Amino acid sequence: MLRSALTSTLSACLAVFATLLYQQWARPSPQLQQQHVTVATKVDREQELAGSPSTAAPSPTTVDLAQALGLGRVLLSRGEHEEAALVYRVAASAAAAIDSNREHGEAQHGLGLALLATGRPEEALAACREAERLDPDLPTATSCIGAILTDAGNIAGALTALRHAAEKAERAGVTAGLWRDAEGTADTIHGRLGAALLAAGEVDEAIEVLTRVELDARRAGGDPHAAYNLGVAWQTKV
């Protein structure tokens, strides 16, 4: 009963946040409007057709999963981490309700990023481990685990996780191109691996990995973080 009530409350909050989000950010592009129709509008339509009052809290199955995940990504990119965590919790409940492990894994990974950005690394680690369990082929969840372990000083555990993440990325044909984490800093799976290798004193391997990251960054237009990390590695070797 408690879990059901919590899910209903979170779902209702998601609808409110979705409405406020699009009101606050005023005029999104037509593409964004089409791709991310507010969850609140969808829920209201469904309740109207069902003859229920619009104030009733939606169940997880009334939440459009793709839209909820998209909204979570928008919130993360805008630094609205608390709101993103709430949205991803609702998305995780919705995915669990339909046994969709892939989307559930994505929601748990997004939740982990949001929790990490709000200073809750232990909760973030648990969410990312759950994402990895749900979707073992998701390299970014394993990379997030490695980053959290690196920050916690568990370098051996971080290296294990980040090596696995790099292997998953290469098996999936994922390039080492840059992506943005929850804090907005440029990073890659291999960049995190290079940092962990440096922390472990594996300087030569770190230089090899970070050189690859810097070259990929240069092809993508250049990134000062990648160049800086490689410079630190060379200074450590000297």
Image (spheres, helix red, strand yellow):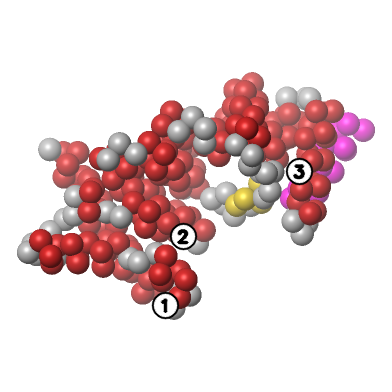
Q: Quadrant of residue 64?
A: bottom left
Residue 86 % position (x, y): 34, 50
| Label 2 SS | helix
| Label 3 SS | helix
Residue 102 % position (x, y): 41, 39
The residue tagged 3 is 213
Q: Amino acid at mark 3?
A: Val
Q: Quadrant of the C terminus?
A: top right
Residue drawn at point x = 57 percent, y = 49 percent:
181
Question: Is 31 situated left or right of 166 in this image?
Answer: left
Question: Is 204 situated left or right of 162 in this image?
Answer: right
The residue tagged 1 is 26
Residue 235 within the magenta-colored segment of the rendering: yes
Give the distance between the C-alpha atoms of the residues marked 3 and 1, in whole angstroms: 37 Å
Magenta stretch: give its range.
225-238
Residue 55 in sight from this viewpoint: no
- Total number of numbered discs in the rendering: 3
- What kind of secondary structure does the magenta stretch mostly adopt? helix
Q: Amino acid at mark 1?
A: Ala
The residue tagged 2 is 74
The mark that comes first in sequence, 2 or 1, is 1
Q: Mark 3, residues whose alpha carbon is within 10 Å: few (<14), some, or many (≥20)?
A: many
